[in-house]
Amino acid sequence: MERKKGLRDMVVVAILLLASIFLFEKCKEYIYAVTNLSYHVQGEFDLPLLTWQHITMSFWSCLLSIIIGMVLGIFSLTRLGSEFRPIIEKMVAASQALPTIGLLAILIPILGFGLLPGIIVLVICGTMPIVFSTITGIENVPEQMIEIGKGLGMTKGEVLLKIQLPLAFPVILSGLRTSSIIIIGSATLTAITGAGGLGLPIFRAGFRGFDPIMLIEGAIPVTLLAMLVDKVFAYCEIRFKTRFEG
């Protein structure tokens, strides 16, 4: 029952997302007429293209965050890495305190405009939840399970890959879920670097052009995209929990 509800929620949000991408432009003229507003910015935005740019940018940022976050989390639990664990935890925690706009303001003069500074900032924003969820998940694996693995002749690497990571996966998955939502939301700000995405109508037309309709045109797909990813992760958690308990 819970799985069916999760699947239904995913489908509903996906339909709303597609409608906001492909139908909003057709309804915009009517919305302007009803609200008695007029265009402040010349030109139209290609929402399907901007959405694809947003998804692509978020995907690569999430992938890099997963790799870096899990490597740092696992390394901090090793004998060598335990000395660096306080530094790693403080650094990734501090990254969340830094404003995204501030990071972009630092990187743009160094790296210039384009996709690269945006990706770097998104990776910084998304790494912290993965680091902490990896550490928490692995640390909470029962010691008996690790001893059983060692008793079967497994090496430390085999214990990690075959016992610790699979058992820690639900906790790590929750970190991935949080990280992906943070990245999708923060990706709107990378429009100021020229990286594209759904932040373009929000900043160029919504804020600079004082056009609330154009702001909504970008904000609704971003919100629905974040909701869809959240529903997908929630469904995966339900599937994993059902399979694990079964």
Image (cartoon, grey):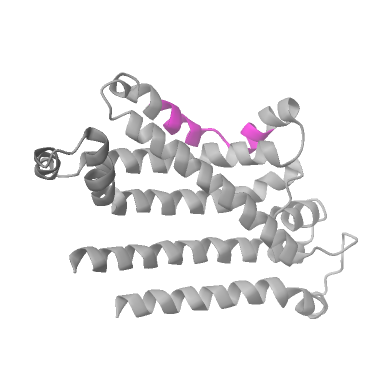
- For the image, the number of numbered tags is 0
Q: Residue 27: where, in percent of width, then height?
A: 76, 79
From this view, report whether residue 55 is shown above or below residue 3: above
* Residue shown at the point (33%, 75%) measured from the top left: 3
- Horizontal side of 181 relative to 41 (left or right) equals left
Quadrant housing the C terminus: bottom left
* Residue shown at the point (32%, 68%) measured from the top left: 239
Q: As rendered, which of 170 and 194 lies closer to the eye? A: 170
Q: Residue 86: where, in percent of width, then height?
A: 33, 23
Quadrant housing the N terminus: bottom left
Which residues lie in the magenta part? 90-104
* Residue shown at the point (82%, 77%) measured from the top left: 29
| Residue sitting at the far right | 42
Q: Residue 189: where, in percent of width, then height?
A: 66, 46
- Magenta stretch, overall SS: helix
Is any part of residue 126 visible from this angle? no
Q: Residue 153: where, in percent of width, then height?
A: 14, 38
Q: Is 69 covered by the magenta stretch?
A: no
Residue 144 occupies which quadrant of the picture? top left
Q: As rendered, which of 31 and 72 lies closer to the eye? A: 72
